[in-house]
Amino acid sequence: QVQLVESGGGLVQPGGSLRLSCAASGFTLDYYAIAWFRQAPGKEREGVSCISSSDGSTYYADSVKGRFTISRDNAKNTMYLQMNSLKREDTAVYYCAAGAHFCSWSDDDYRFWGQGTQVTVSS
């Protein structure tokens, strides 16, 4: 059974850090481009970061560049999003996605999705 299970969301103060994890089962993450998306209340889902399968190149939305880091642990079949210097505008439900042939900001390119985890940045 193909599954992506996320963890690590929560409430954090502005300037704080969180690390999201996404464990895959039923398929191998390393075969695909993997990404994190987020959806804030009243807004469309947007791409945050992606890591390619071919050469490990990483891509970030301008809004998170320099603050977020995407990574994968092939031995654990798990992907991560390290989020530092969090801002109130980072508040959203975060989703991991996998199954794309190449990095893309389009939802339609990803076959597998996690259930989403809430990240709230507030004092």
Image (cartoon, grey):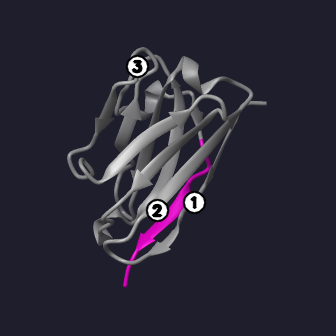
Considering only order in the chain, which callout, 1 or 3, is on the residue closer to the N terminus? 1
Residue, disc 1: 8
User: Based on the displayed image, in which of its 4 quarters is residue 73 positioned?
Assistant: top right
Which mark identifies residue 89?
none
Q: Residue at x 46, y 38 (%)?
A: 71
Calculate the distance from the C-alpha at mark 3 to the C-alpha at mark 2: 26 Å
Query: What's the mark number on residue 102?
Result: 3
The 10 Å Cα crowd at callout 1, few under 14, some 14 to 19, many 20 or more, is some
Question: In the image, what residue type sits under mark 1?
Answer: Gly
Q: Which residues are magenta?
A: 114-123
Q: Which of labels 3 and 1 is toward the front?
A: 1
Numbered tag placed on residue 18 in the rendering: 2
Q: Residue 66: x, y in percent?
A: 24, 49
- Which percent across, then down, holds residue 87? 29, 68
Residue under the image location 36 percent in, 51 percent down: 44
- Could you tell me if the residues under marks 3 and 1 are in contact, i.e. CB atoms within 8 Å? no
**Which amino acid is tagged 2?**
Leu
Furthest residue in direction left, as rendered = 62
- 9 w.r.t. 70: above or below: below
